[in-house]
Amino acid sequence: MDGSIEHAGHFRLRNMDAAGSSFSADHSRDRTDHVYDRESDTPVHTGGASMISSFFNLTNAIVGAGVIGLPYAIRQAGFIIGVLMIIVLALLVDWTLRVLALNSKLSGQQTYQGLVEHCFGRTGLLANSFFQGAMAGGGMASFIVIVGDTLPHVLFALMPSVGQTGFGQFVFSRRFVIAFFVIFMAYPLSLYRDVGKLSKTSAFAVVAMCTIIASVIIEGPRIDSELRAERGSPVVLANTGVFQAVGIITFAFVCHHNSFMIYGSLRKPTLNRYFEVIHISTVIATVASLIIAIIGYIYFREKTQGNILNNFPQDNLLINIARSLFALNMITTFPMETLVAREVIDQLMFRNQEFSMKRHVIITTVLCALCLVVGETVCNLGVLLELTGGLSASFLAFILPPACYIKLCSGPKLSWKTVPHWLCICFGFTVMVLSTVLSIRHAVVSQEANGSCWNVQ
């Protein structure tokens, strides 16, 4: 697939102005950190993120909160179909990320919003902003809710004597834990303007995810047999929940709304360097996803829950450490989504204005405050996030990138060269419609509602 991409864009890339082909994580950021070699059309670096930093950022964006739901996706689709879908969707994400980067070169645009507006005008910009903002906002809210659902139980399990005191009950309460981590961790990290500066936290997030996978592998055979799959229970090879599984896997892998900023923070942001980052990050993310998906499903099979960590008892020390790291992982991933949401607001409302630190702080504060309110008042975001995540992820990853490429490429729009792009668009619309319908159906038939957490300590 990528051969046709590079062939179509080769001539045009060679003749593009170097400054026009540069890429930035923040369109209003000072551009003096790059000097361009006009003969080679390559930026000579005087600042920015290394390839290792960009690798950690992109891997963290791919291996996010959705990875703990992959064993459940295997259960829904069946072992063989589920594994194949993880591999196929990972390849598709790798390809569409490269298509997106090439689109930015062909159009000279520096942001996802700018690219879509360049291709489809104001209507395209509004549509993209809606889906991109919904994806980022839903991610921010879900990360905070995960912290509230995870850390209080871990703290009570690790320090039961403290938890029995009045002070401990207050400090370990859901409300206090959420407020503390949002105000003192997520919010300060979200004030960064450059994702390259988040590489250390992203590196921690990648290490934390590896620890989570290791804990599942180690503790799975050691827990009470009553919690594991019953002896002799079959490994279902194919199941009826294929489209539900596609939604889960898509939500886990899609990071396209973050990719522009990661590309822009890369030192010498050339296509070859960024493609290398994409390939390495996707391979690592796919291997990690397959490991936790396969091992988690084999251990629990028909008992596999939507969050694989919920299959383990609350007093398991290693799993509680994994839960803690997972919660911290959400905190370190939170700023990536904040950057996207803030960029959407800047593009829609302040696109022709100079950067203002006051406006930057106000927008960041409002976004974090809204997520804090959601985390404090809502316990179950499952149906809402299933709806917004499935709808937004499919649109941003599988519909817009190939659609923009078809719009930008020269020659007939319907040709053998564009067949993969049209197929990807059809796949994206199919997943988007089915995910939306199934999410609404689940909301109607589910016995659980998005309840209030004010009665939760």
Image (cartoon, rainbow, N blue to C red):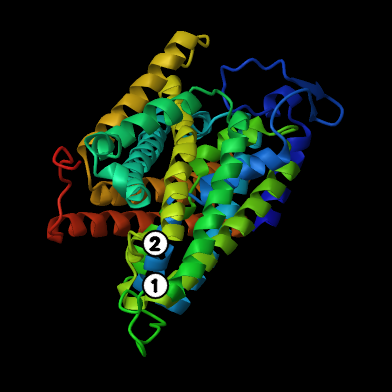
- Left or right, 365 with reference to 2: left
Q: What residue type is labelled 2?
A: Asn
Q: How crowded is mark 1: few (under 14 residues within 10 Å), some or many (20 or more)?
A: some
> Between residues 163 and 326, which one lies in front from this camera angle?
163
| Helix, strand or loop status at disc 1 | loop
> Between residues 279 and 191, which one lies in front from this camera angle?
191
Q: Could you say where residue 193 lies in the image, as x and y percent from the top left?
A: 55, 23
Q: How many labels does the image show?
A: 2
For the N terminus, which image quadrant? bottom right
Disc 2 and disc 1 in contact, CB within 8 angstroms: yes
The residue that disc 1 covers is 223
Give me the C-alpha separation between circle 2 and circle 1: 8 Å
Residue sitting at x 39%, y 80%: 238
| Helix, strand or loop status at disc 2 | loop
Q: Could you say where residue 384 lies in the image, as x and y percent from the top left?
A: 25, 46
> Between residues 408 and 194, which one lies in front from this camera angle?
194
Q: Is residue 371 visible?
A: no
The residue that disc 2 covers is 316
Residue sitting at x 53%, y 24%: 192
> Between residues 321 and 64, which one lies in front from this camera angle?
321
N-term-proximal mark, 2 vs 1? 1
Q: What residue type is labelled 1?
A: Ile
Residue sitting at x 32%, y 36%: 177
- Left or right, 17 with reference to 174: right
Residue sitting at x 52%, y 53%: 209
- Left or right, 130 with reference to 112: left
Q: Can residue 66 be seen in this view?
A: yes
Q: Could you say where residue 99 lies in the image, as x and y percent from the top left?
A: 60, 47
- In the picture shown, does residue 215 fall above or below 268? below
Q: Could you say where residue 307 lies in the image, as x and y percent from the top left?
A: 35, 59
